[in-house]
Image (tube, grey):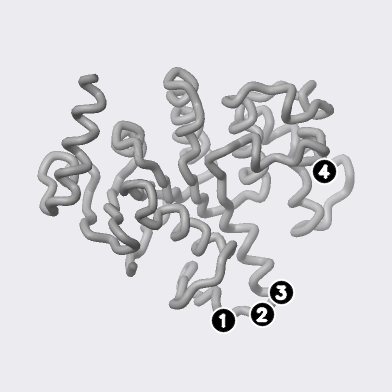
Amino acid sequence: VNFSIPQKSTIGLVGESGSGKSTLGKALAGLINYQGSVLYDGVNINQLNSKESKSIKKDIQIVFQDPYGSLSPRMTVGEIVGEGLGVHFKLKSHEIQNRIDKVLSDVGIELSAKNKYPHEFSGGQRQRIAIARSLIMNPAFMILDEPTSALDRSIQIQVINLLKDIQEEYKLTYLFISHDLKVIRSMSDYIFVMKDGKIVESGLSKEVFEYPKEKYTKKLLSAALRYASD
């Protein structure tokens, strides 16, 4: 694959299960080894030393599909959300607590939840906590790997609206990975269609949805329409 993501935009990455969407997201987040180059703000992150790489990693955050599996059951919400601050920033205790309070408020979690554990929350609330954990690092780029697929439709809408709100407030750039074309269309400025590890079509969201060029894209859209009618 070879593509670029404009700042403060949302790229929707779609494709069937096994097409390589999540693998690509993990590669961009530096979670797996890969061949090639990833340039962040013109800097090849593959060529950075450990100190330089650590500095950039706080700018690139990822939210996973399963909010329960991605949150440590042995840590409180406050510990989970604030853990990254101790790795990347030199802050006093009260400064850490203030930042935890700020992001929890921004994602709609009551401050009294700081001393609770992940199992005490619903799936939608756990995903909000996972978003807060990424948001507290004050990133510029967030990779959202199927962040709503494990949630009920009504909760999906709430999380999507939340992501839109914090994108505007924090001036974020998103890579939004999903097989749900309805969610992708509501979120994305641009669409990348992935098949067998390759980008087979890309363009403005409206153009791809209304005037798809590739047979594979037309197949995905047709399947989505049949699913919606059922």
Locate the C terminus and report the quarter of the image it occupies: top left
Q: Is residue 48 above or below residue 17?
A: below
CB under 8 Å between callouts 1 and 3? no
CB under 8 Å between callouts 1 and 4? no
- Residue under circle 1? 47
Circle on res. 51: 3
Q: Secondary structure at mark 4?
A: helix
> Which numbered disc, 1 or 4, marks the residue that appears first in the sequence?
1
CB under 8 Å between callouts 2 and 3? yes
Instruction: Assess disc 3: are there few (<14), some (14-19) or many (≥20) residues with their C-alpha within 10 Å of its C-alpha.
Output: few
- Residue under circle 4? 95
Q: Is residue 61 left or right of residue 98?
A: left
Instruction: Assess disc 2: are there few (<14), some (14-19) or many (≥20) residues with their C-alpha within 10 Å of its C-alpha.
Output: few
Q: Amino acid at mark 4?
A: Glu
> Which numbered disc, 4 or 2, marks the residue that appears first in the sequence?
2
Query: How many numbered marks, from 0 up?
Result: 4
Q: Is residue 65 above or below residue 87?
A: above
